[in-house]
Image: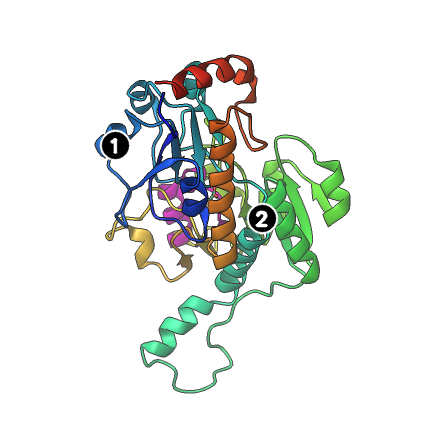
Amino acid sequence: MPDRPRVFVTRNLPGDALGLLRQTCEVAVWPDQLPPSPDDLRREAATTHGLLTLLTDHIDATLLAAAPNLIAVSNMATGYDNIDVADASRRLVLVSRTPGVLTETSADLAFGLLLAAARRIAEGDRYVRAGNWRTWGPEIMLGPDVHGATLGIIGLGRIGAAVARRAAGFGMRVLYHGRSRNTQAEKEVGAAYADLDALLAQSDFVSIHAALTDDTRGLIAARQFGLMKPSAILINTARGPLVDHDALYEALRSGEIAGAALDVTDPEPLPADSPLLALDNVVITPHIASASIATRSEMARLAADNLLTSLAGAVNDNAVNTEIAGDWRAAAAARLHS
Ligand code: GLV
């Protein structure tokens, strides 16, 4: 039996998360800025009891098959589409995530991107730096008003509802669409349910907050852009593949919609020759919605805490495959001894 569980962390983390893990575990940390390659990750996973992963790490069937002692994967993200949860469950590996702690910070950025795209903030900055600002001009850098406009939110979960609360401060009308109606949030944030087509047709801004699943991949594609107003702006802070990027480029280029603001893309990062990068009516940030100092430290701490709870044989509150709990406990105890 090892004295202490072995843990592999796929990048250096902010805050005291590594210190917390080191109190009871043997901790190895991937030292580079870039993620470990699939081979590197497989090699590390082969001997580890716990993995602390990021959304850039693909925890797929090949990796899980090569990790016989693995007890738990703790993802430092609220999304977990980088993990094959079905296969993890088959192999009795508990998967957890870090919801809740990043809600407000992520909503701040989503709303900031909405403002940036509408009021051409990034474009204006480029204009000034390029030496083009010669005078105050009555027709320079005009954009739509945000206050009083209609915001369509796709996915009224925690972050979507936090964006709706911000929209209320701007006097916006809020529509939402989701897998199911969220009547409590409807009342709390004053959002009205609409089917997706109606939401797309009526909204001045459409902000995506849905999880990426087989059902939502390509949710916004050519037909959906065709339904949107020519003045509409799309904001995506959820996952890149929710939007068909070829269709997005075409909609932005042809004026089918007015603009977009993306914190997530498909792929990430965008290749340097992506045509989207040549368009002025798109604002792109490098997947930083949760990137405040306090929130990233809190996400790391929660991911460490989730992992430690799992390694102690208990199902943590943020586990996503709790249905395996019974068999998992027995498997986890046996794996700790190997
Ligand atoms: C970030 O995208 C997250 O899922 O936490």
Q: Which mark is residue 38?
A: 1
* Tag 1 secondary structure: helix
Residue 103: numbered disc? 2
Amino acid at pointer 1: Pro
Helix, strand or loop: magenta stretch: helix
Q: Estimate the spatial distance between the alpha carbons at disc 2 and disc 1, rounded to whole Å.
A: 30 Å
Give the quarter of the image for residue 284. Answer: bottom left
Question: Which mark, residue 96?
Answer: none
111 relative to 293 in the view: left or right: right
Q: Nearer the viewer, residue 187 or 142?
A: 187
Give the x, y percent position of residue 309: 52, 31
Residue 242 colored in magenta in the image: yes
In the rendered structure, which amino acid carries the disc numbered 2?
Answer: Thr
Front in this rendered view, residue 96 or 291: 96
**Can residue 190 be spotted in the picture?**
no
User: Percent from the top left, x then y, of residue 226?
Assistant: 49, 43
